[in-house]
Amino acid sequence: MRAVCLVGLAGLFPALFCESFSAYKSSVLVTNRKNCPITILQKIPKCTVSSLSMAMLLLDDDGNDEDSKLFLRREMLTHVGAMASTLGLLTMDPRNAAASVDVNTVTNDASSPGLVYPPITHKVYMDVRISRADGTFYVRDDLPDTPENQVFQGKLVLGLFGTLAPNHVEQFLKYVSVSYNPTEDDPLPSYARSSFNRLDQSNGLLAGGVIPSLEITEIGGSTALRYGSRILSAPLWYDKIDKDKRVSHSMGKGLLTHRTLDLSPSFGITTRAAGEELDSTHVVFGRLLPDGDSQRFLRVCEDIPTYSVDRPGPTDSPINSTVDDLASQVFATQRDFFRGAAKTFGDSRVGKVYEGKLLRRVEVTQIGLL
């Protein structure tokens, strides 16, 4: 009798599996009256109903002894429970699957543990601070508690890819391992006195590593760095990296990158997944390591307003469209003329006004190796 009972169950499970696989392929969502998804077990085809009915009839057969009925019930509960668990995975609707996933764990972020990166050979900490909108850092109790009136202070931890881009990492560390002495008259340039000054809205690249008074100059037909009274060599930041080993800027935010053939120590941090156009002009040599300070730092920087040298866009009024276009052309001509004249006369203030300039002070106060 037990063999006959198992034959009845044998027709049930293949039918359930075939029906669940068909529903999974077609991704048809089945809902109840409360608009909640239901499993495929609640939508059994006719062939499955027949097999289930046959098994239930075997249970109700008065000719079966109690031991056989108890055995059959246990077997049905065991196998149906296992099949229900399997079918629950197979019949999960793709549109509802995303609702059960924590979006914070799947964001396209360079600090996400799910992404694969080159090994980290060095760790660098960087203490940063962001001023209020008025440029101050000191304690003030007379201002409303709004985001633009809050001072941010935090510690960033950078992981460097020394095996992928050894030359980039070597040049970067030259501005990290500099001991800072405020009483020294002629110090070496260091990231400990640098700032983040620009956010490119087109690709989300946050420009950092800007060291005041450090300039690129030409001496004797060669390029060098001038810092105060010091003349420093300007080696090229270059690493020959195979295309299939390069880290793409499209992998997410938090990537540490440097412009190809740029002699200055300035670098960039991606605040979002940038387009692949950066892959041809920049090299990724590190990333921000995941912690609360790094996430808040990038979020605050993204919210800082930036300067634009363009005239505000025209209105949507068709009547004034011609006037607005003409005014924009006049404005652009005047802007280019006066900026060109200022550069000719050596006015350094021109270089302090540029597209994407952050309208709050973002400074590095201390840096070092971990």
Image (cartoon, rainbow, N blue to C red):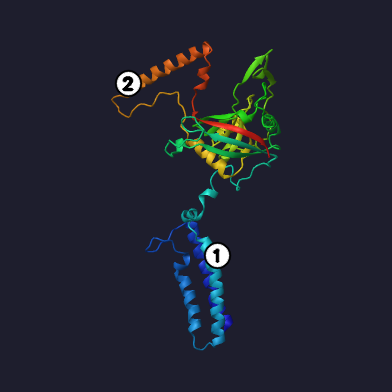
Q: In this view, does 318 lie above or below 56?
A: above
- Residue 327: where, in percent of width, then height? 36, 19
- Image marks 1 and 2: residues in contact by CB distance under 8 Å: no
Q: Position of residue 166 (x, y in %)?
A: 71, 34
Q: Which of 15 and 209 is in front in this view?
A: 209
Q: In this view, does 21 lie above or below 180?
A: below
Residue denoted by label 1? 86
Number of numbered discs overlaid on the protein picture = 2
Q: What residue type is labelled 2?
A: Val
**Quarter assignment of residue 171:** top right
**Image point (30%, 27%), residue name:** 318
Residue at label 2?
323
97 relative to 262, above or below: below
Mark 1 secondary-structure assignment: helix
Mark 1 is surrounded, within 10 Å at the Cα level, by few (under 14), some (14 to 19) or many (20 or more) other residues, namely few
For label 2, the crowd category at 10 Å Cα-Cα, with few meaning under 14, some 14 to 19 and many 20 or more, is: few
Residue 192: mark: none
Q: Say whether residue 138 is left or right of residue 316.
A: right
Q: Which of marks 1 and 2 is nearer the N terminus?
A: 1
Q: Which residue type carries mark 1? A: Thr
Closer mark to the observer between disc 1 and disc 2: 2
To which quarter of the image does residue 325 belong? top left
Q: Quadrant of the C terminus?
A: top right
Can residue 244 be seen in the rendering of this structure?
Answer: no
**Residue 67 in the image, given as x and y percentages of width and height:** 57, 86
Q: Residue at x 67, y 38 (%)?
A: 161
Residue 347, placed above or below residue 43: above
Instruction: Please tell me which residue is depicted at 43% across the width and 58% down the height of the picture.
Output: 29
Measuring from the top left, give residue 213's x and y in whole percent. Answer: 60, 21
Residue 206 appears in view: yes
